[in-house]
């Protein structure tokens, strides 16, 4: 029976009380060192077995993961009913491979061994849903390319969790860029003024699921977490590709040229480190990054400029310790077209909520442009009811009902639902694998270039 048929059957059986043998997807969670591993299970899925096997070493990261799953099971609103079976031991990876207790491995944790985890999981015949990044160095990129080849041979799906594709302003920015009567076409841009520029600002100290987030100490070690562009930059490079070339397969050897990359540090003092981790002292592996004043220098900020199919793009990642009052992680973006620029802003003026604007090019046909823009919004409103337009100074603001702003945590369930659909179909969209390879080439080449700078 094809997997698609099994998924349909499992959905039906779940309605009437399915047994474990009826579920088509059985999750394995491998070494869950990052809270994103838990967010995959924030909701239940009809085709997924509630029994989830976790393989990990003993430690606070595992304890935090198990507590997070339990909090989902015991919450008042839409409680989940996951049944966690945990194996704890130094041989957790080999034990997972030997047990074969599931068919989809969820990987989210320290990035030092993530590509190795992916490699071993694919070699054992598991499907893999991995948190970003799947590779953080040029050497990791080489192994990852081999893993995509192995996945094809073994007929399993390797996929990374790209939550930002589900943010509503990003979706509508992408959709408006596909209306030539509004956007025109992408300008070529220059390295100094690229056609696409995206920036992401993150914070070490924040709340997740309503509780203060406790970071593992290794999160501050770039050898384990990854530097700015190979880590968070993965999302931004993905958005450039996904937003500018929807449905198009990119060739990392032919379609892109990485031009420049830089890196710089975020300074973390001992009090801040304790607030974020709960630890009084820096672990020994962080000592090389501590300056003479006792300040931890974390190379978590950076940017990269590259060309993709002839247009210039740039992304920048910044990590601060914590956000100003009322603020949170922030995203900004500009797509520059021959008729208009499409802007996403998320500053104090927007009350720290991502907001989409249209900035028309100067010209005599203002009334004509307004008519075209209104028509484009009406077309999009067929899919996204009640979106609209209002003037905001010299810009047009796309007004978006609050119901579409579901939040970052909810996007993990949306990605997982997409992945489950791909599993039921037995394949990823044709463009996904070449574009993942291209994305990780850009991010790891940025790592190489930024380290080569004098």
Image (cartoon, helix red, strand yellow):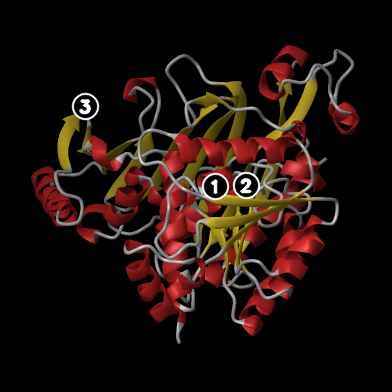
Location of residue 270 (image quadrant):
top right
Where's the C terminus, which quadrant? top right
The residue tagged 1 is: 314
Location of residue 350 (image quadrant):
top left
Q: Residue at x 71, y 24 (%)?
A: 277
Where residue 424 sits in the image (x, y, percent)?
44, 74
Q: Which numbered tag is attached to residue 269?
A: none
- Callout 3–callout 2 Cβ contact below 8 Å: no
Q: How many discs mark residues in the rendered view?
A: 3
Q: At numbered mark 1, what does the secondary structure look like: helix, strand or loop?
A: strand
How far, Cα to Cα, is label 1 from label 3? 27 Å
Would residue 297 be found to the left or right of residue 306 on screen? right
How far, Cα to Cα, is label 2 from label 1? 6 Å
Where's the N terminus, which quadrant? bottom left
Compared to residue 409, the image places residue 440 above or below, namely: below
How far, Cα to Cα, is label 3 from label 2? 32 Å
Where residue 218 sits in the image (x, y, percent)?
77, 36
Name the N-terminal-most of marks 3 and 2.
2
- Callout 2–callout 1 Cβ contact below 8 Å: yes
The residue tagged 2 is: 304
The residue tagged 3 is: 393
Location of residue 220 (image quadrant):
top right
């Amino acid at each position: 029976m094809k997997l698609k048929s099994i998924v349909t059957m499992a959905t039906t059986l779940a309605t009437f009380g399915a047994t474990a043998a009826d579920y088509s997807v059985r999750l394995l969670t491998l070494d869950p060192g990052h809270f994103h591993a838990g967010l995959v299970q924030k909701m239940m899925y009809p085709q997924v077995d509630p029994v989830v096997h976790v393989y990990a070493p003993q430690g606070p990261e595992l304890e935090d993961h198990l507590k997070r799953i339990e909090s989902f099971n015991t919450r008042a609103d839409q409680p989940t009913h996951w049944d966690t079976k945990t194996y704890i031991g130094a041989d957790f990876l080999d034990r997972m491979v030997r047990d074969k207790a599931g068919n989809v491995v969820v990987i989210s944790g320290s990035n030092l061994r993530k590509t190795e985890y992916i490699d071993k999981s694919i070699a054992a015949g598991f499907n893999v849903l991995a948190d970003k990044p799947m590779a953080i160095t040029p050497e990791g990129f080489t192994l990852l390319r081999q893993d995509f080849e192995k996945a094809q041979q073994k007929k399993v799906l390797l996929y990374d969790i790209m939550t930002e594709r589900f943010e509503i302003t990003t979706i509508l920015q992408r959709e408006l860029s596909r209306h030539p009567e509004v956007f025109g076409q992408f300008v070529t841009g220059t390295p100094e003024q690229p056609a696409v520029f995206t920036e992401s600002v993150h914070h070490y100290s924040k709340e997740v699921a309503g509780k203060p987030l406790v970071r593992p100490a290794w999160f501050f070690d770039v050898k384990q977490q990854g530097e700015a562009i190979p880590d968070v930059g993965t999302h931004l490079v993905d958005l450039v590709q996904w937003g500018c070339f929807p449905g198009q397969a990119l060739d990392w050897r032919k379609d892109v040229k990485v031009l420049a990359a830089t890196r710089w540090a975020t300074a973390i003092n001992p009090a801040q480190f304790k607030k974020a981790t709960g630890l009084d002292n820096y672990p020994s592996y962080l000592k090389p990054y501590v300056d003479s004043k006792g300040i931890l220098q974390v190379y978590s900020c950076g940017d990269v400029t590259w060309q993709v199919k002839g247009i210039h793009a740039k992304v920048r990642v910044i990590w601060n310790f914590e956000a100003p009052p009322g603020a949170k992680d922030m995203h900004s973006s500009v797509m520059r077209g021959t008729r208009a620029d499409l802007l996403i802003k998320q500053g104090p003026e927007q009350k720290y909520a991502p907001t989409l604007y249209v900035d028309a090019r100067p010209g005599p046909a203002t009334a004509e442009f307004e008519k075209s823009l209104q028509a484009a919004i009406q077309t999009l409103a067929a899919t996204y009811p009640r979106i609209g337009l209002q003037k905001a100074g010299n810009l047009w603001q796309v007004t978006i009902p609050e119901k579409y702003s579901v939040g970052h945590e909810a996007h993990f369930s949306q990605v997982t639902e997409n992945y489950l659909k791909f599993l039921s179909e037995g394949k990823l969209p044709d463009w996904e694998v070449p574009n993942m390879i291209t994305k990780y080439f850009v991010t790891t080449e940025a790592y190489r270039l930024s380290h080569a700078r004098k």
